[in-house]
Structure formats: C-alpha cells, structure tokens
Amino acid sequence: MEGLEFLALKDDSHSRNNWLRGSCSLGIMPANGMTYVPSDQCFCSPGVKILGLNALTAAKDFHAVAPVQDRLLKGPCYGKPAADYQKPQWAAYRHDSLRSGSASVEVSADLKKSWKLQLDPSITQPVVAGDRLFIASRDTHTVHALKSDSGKKIWSFTAGGRVDSSPTLWKGLLLFGSADGNLYCLRQSDGGLVWKFQAAPHRRLIQSYGQLESAWPLNGSVLMLDDLAYIAAGRSTYLDGGLYLYAIEPATGKVVYQHQELGPYADLSRDFGHSYWSEGARNDVLVSDGESIFIMQLRFGKNLKPNPAKTESLLGDRKLGRRVFSTAGFLDDEWYNRAFWMYSNIWPGYYLANQAPNSGQILVFDDTTTYGVKVFWTRNRHTTMFFPGTRGYLLFANDNDNEPILVGRDKGTPVTWLPEFNMNKGGKPKTNWGPGLSSAPRKSSVDAYTYNKDKGIGFTSVSKPKWSVYVPIRIKAMVKTNNRIFVAGAPDVFDEENDPLGALEGRKGGVLCDFSAADGSKIRQYTLDAPPVLDGLIAVEGKLFLATRDGKLSCWR
C-alpha cells in the first residue's frame, strides 16, 4: 500500500520496498527481466525513496570485497608533500563542513566584472585558496585549476566519471569523489595524482543519464573533519549492498574508519511498516556539526558508528541535532514543490514545512541567523504553490534558535507570517495572487491540530522572522558575507503568450542582487547574461565568483 510490493504465490517470501514507488495509482512495470520504476510526484518516504526513472533487477550476491589496502592506487606524487600551499578562503562545497554558505568577509556593494571564462554548462560551485581557484565540470569529469585574479587556466584533470560538486581543499591537496566510484587526491600546485582510492566495493558499471558510472558513485564534495576525509559510496542503503562509508587520511589514503550501512529490511512477519515514511536513506553530500556526520535522516559518530535517533511521531520526524539538509538532496535543482531545505534540530519525516521558520528552497546561515528564500509561500490542501510573475519569492532572515513546532505536541503558539491559499464560498481566491484553482481546497490554518496528521499544515513557527521581503528573482544561489546577502537567479517574469517557460529555462538572462543582512533592504542589482547554476555563488575577501548556466565563470570585485 505504500511502495513496491512483491507477493509470493507459493510461500511467504513476500517483500515490501517503500523506498520505491510509481506515481499515485499508476505505474511500475515488470519487463525484460527487470522492474521499471518511473518518476513520481510523491513526498512519501522523503530522503529514502530513490528519484528519477530506474530499472532494477533482483539483488545479487557479490564476491568478497577486496581489502581496502588493495584498493589504494598510489600516484606519481605519493609521498611528495605539496609545497608552498595557501590557506583556503572557500575550502569546500558551501564553504565548510557545516555547509553554511556563509563567509566572514567584506565585499563591496559597488561591483564590476573583473574577468569571465567560458567553461562548460555543467560547472559547479568553485573553491578558492589564495590566488588559485578550483572548479569541477560535472559532465566532462574534469577539475580545473585557474588563477583567481585572471581566470587563466593552470591545469586540468579528468576523472573516470562525473564530478557533481565542488572539490575540497586541505593543506595543499585537492580531494574529490567521482561517479566512477573513486576518491581522488591531487596536488593543488600542479594537479599531480597523489593517490586514488576505490571506495566502490566492486567494479561494476551502469548507465546513468547517458553515461557509464559505478553502481556505487561518490559525490564530488568530500567532508573534512579533524583532518580526516569522510566519504560515502553508493546510491541508497537498499541498493547493491547499501552505502559504504570511509574516513581516510588525506596525505596517505589510509582508511582509518569504515562502515557499511544496509537497509534496514523489514521482518514482514512482524513489521507492518509505517505510513508515508521509511528508515534508511539515499546518499547525499555529507554534513557535520563538528561532532556527528549526517546523511539525510542518518547520523554517525566520527568513527562512523551509527547513532540513530528515535522517531517522535507516527509520521517519522526525529531530533538529530542542528544541521542543514535538503529532503531532495543538496544537488537537486528542480525546485520540486514538496521538497525543501531546512536548518533545524529535526528531521521532518512526512510533515510539510512551508510554514516552518528556517525552511525554504535554499538557505545560508551564520552563528545567529538563517537566511533563505521561500518559493512556495502558499498552498492548497497538501500541495504548495507559487504564481510566477506576480508577488515574487520571499527572502527572509530568522533566528537560528527559532525551531519549528507541531500543534498538538510542542509548546508555543504559532504565528501567521505566510499566507495560506484558502477559498471563499464562491470558489474564488481571497486575494489576487495568481490564477484560481479548479476546486476549493480544504481550509487550513497555522493553529490547526497537526500532530500525527498527514497532509496537515505541518511544522509552523512560534515567532515572526527578523525581516522578510518579496523579491522578483528566482533565487538559485546565495551567499552571506559580513553584512550583506548576495543572491542570483533568473528574473521573475512570465511571458504567457510568447515564452512562458523562458525564465525557468534560462532564456531571460539573470540577476545578481545584494541585500542588507540587517533589515533586508535592497542595495544594488546587476544584470547577468544567464542565471546561476545551483549554489553557483561564493564570496572571498573583496570578490564574488559566479558560475552560470551558460557555462561561464566570472569574477566580480
């Protein structure tokens, strides 16, 4: 009744796989000795259910995994320490292991484009150390090293598979994972290979988005914590033996800790499952609060021992410790209306959170404040909505300590700070925010009982934000500096007659804008040739670096 179920006709070897499902009422096809599972619109089992169109076969027994020491390939620069390296200014994806997207630097409001370089449309967020900049080109498997003051190319390195996110800098070394199942370590100075570690337990390739890659891919981003590099290979705790986690010495490639996270698979003779949520997780960019390591709703210690948290309600929410996460994954850029980012102590389970204080489609934060953008600031029954070319999108600032609550369980009285799209009796919208709906949705309010209630209002807030302002920008990249919030995105225009999808698909150019972090007042706006790639904006002292969807990397100073 939840996901993909197999019913045995001769015995009791049934199975339930809630981490797979077709769209509601439709769609899973057994054929060609495989099971085809299509994309779906459901929010069920967030952080666990695999996404996209997938073709799967029955699980196979693999031969014994080779010892980790036999999977380390030493390169020509092994044992030759990186000399004359510079301190990183933006060391990793979203700046740090917290994935804060925030840097304590000054950047002027009066910016001019210093240089621009044509690379590839699949470029990622860059990282910077001194006069060196490093950026990955996802679909060409390439990492580039550039002069940060001019954009001049220094060297390039091509891996065996996609590199989907920023490399990580550590003491003159550059570390990044690849979809070929390997972790690479290069010297920053010349791109020389120090070592390559096969994190995938076996060499097995599948077709993924038109290319071959390992059945156990790695994200490009590597988490550094206490001078160890943490990675996870695999797609899901339910696929191909699960996720394989490692903590590795960057200088030597030596594995210090390792763990295999598998399942958990239910005992169907006793376990009837849960509505809308599942244990386990999809793989994602690793996050740390300095003590624990997180993948979706999973938590591990520094030694990679699991440290699970109990569920707090029937819909699967749990308290894990404050960290940023995305229920769809950090690298998903679809703006799917039932998925969201959040900076909170909780994992939301099946509850929606468009009314929650520190949730949105992208977030950055510092020691005291979370800044974000809410695209879907209103909703009907259980589908959040937006109306392009009308009010815009809500940019906000909120106290980090303003944790979300569930009415009926948690203390506090929720406040109304976002509209709910309720209908009058005549079926017309109360306010002209956009086109009407075909039928009146169920009325909802922020103080409605929501504990253990599916499709209710979900998590709400006990206090209003520090400030909020609607902006006419489809924000896909943002960064916090000492006193400003820089954002970039496509303009919020809707050309209904000639090109209704033009802004969404990048044909209407882009906008770079900065706002006061203190009160949200707009300071300056710049026109871009194209909108940014997701999270494609970073700040270092006096400069912004911006990666855009036309494949250009530019420096503003």
Image (cartoon, helix red, strand yellow):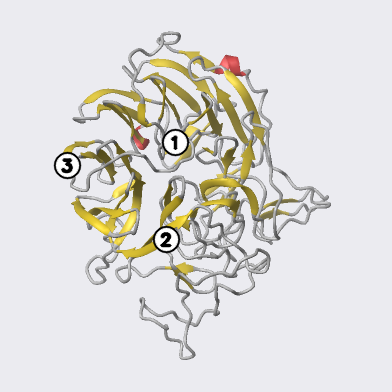
Q: Which residue is mark 2?
A: 466
Residue 520 on image: x %, y %: 33, 59
Secondary structure beneath label 3 = strand
State the residue in front, 221 or 60.
221
Is residue 263 left or right of 267 when viewed as pictured?
left
Instruction: List the residue tagged with mark 3.
Output: 113
Question: Viewer-proximal residue, 323 or 452?
Answer: 323
Q: Quadrant of residue 216?
A: top right
Q: CB of mark 3 within 8 Å of CB of mark 1?
A: no
Q: Is residue 464 above or below residue 9?
A: below
Image quarter in which the N terminus is found:
bottom right
Mark 3 or 2, which is nearer the eye? 2
Q: Position of residue 387 (x, y in %)?
A: 36, 70
Question: Identity of the amino acid at label 3?
Answer: Lys
Residue 380's x, y, as percent?
A: 50, 74
Residue situated in front as seen by the camera: 218 or 221: 221
Disc marking residue 96: 1
